Amino acid sequence: MPYLLGLLGLIVTVLILLSRLADAGIDLGGLNPFLWRRRRAWRQKFEANPLFGLDQPMDVAAVLAVGVAKADGDMSTQQKQALLEGFQQTFNIDIRAAEDLLSSSAHLAGDGRILRDQVHDVVATNKEHFSDKQIESTLSLLKKIAAVEGASDRQRELISNVEASLRDQPSTGTWE
């Protein structure tokens, strides 16, 4: 019986101390591992680059096309016009939807550095959603956009990286 009273006294003392710490502004809820895991997962999702969260093949193809146009810097007027026409023909959308897709893709692509450096990671989340026909039309759209002002080395490299990522081709580098 005295052990039981001692245990109950200890529990009440700990609860009162925790209550006093909470009143003083010290939150011990952050020590909860379940809460920590949930907060960490939300933070990673919230702070992640939206390029890696695209969930539609059309969005990925549009961002890749804008990335090809921006490979050498900002897009020219001819490239923007070719992108709008390419979006209308490839995705069967009207001019207003093509303009919206171009503006959102240009915002997501930014300066295009992430697309050049991590194109495989951008494509990887949607690779299984692409059909063979969609892969071919995406690659033809990219080549058409690159040919507007003559394909540069950066554009050709980006297109080959996209093709390798979409078709799961191993890199053809040599051993050093």
Image (cartoon, grey):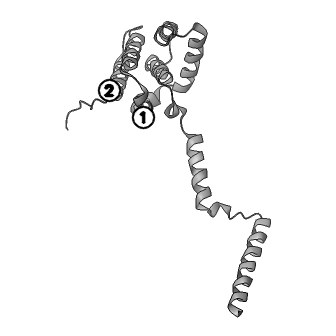
Residue 53, image x, y percentages: 52, 34
- For badge 1, the amino acid type reads Asp
Residue under the image location 43 percent in, 27 percent down: 129
Could you give the CA–CA distance between mark 2 and mark 1, rounded to whole angstroms?
Answer: 14 Å
Q: Quadrant of the N terminus?
A: bottom right
| Secondary structure at numbered mark 2 | helix
Using the rendered image of the protein, determine whether residue 130 is visible from the camera's viewpoint: yes
Taking the view exactly as shown, the residue that stands out farthest to the front is 1
Which of the pair 126/44 is nearer the observer?
Answer: 126
Residue under the image location 36 percent in, 13 percent down: 151
User: How many numbered circles are shown?
Assistant: 2
Using the rendered image of the protein, determine whether residue 110 is visible from the camera's viewpoint: no
Q: Looking at the rendering, which quadrant does residue 141 occupy?
A: top left
Residue under the image location 57 percent in, 8 percent down: 94
Q: Residue 121 carries which label?
A: 1
Residue 68, image x, y percentages: 43, 19
Quick check: 71 above or below 36?
A: above
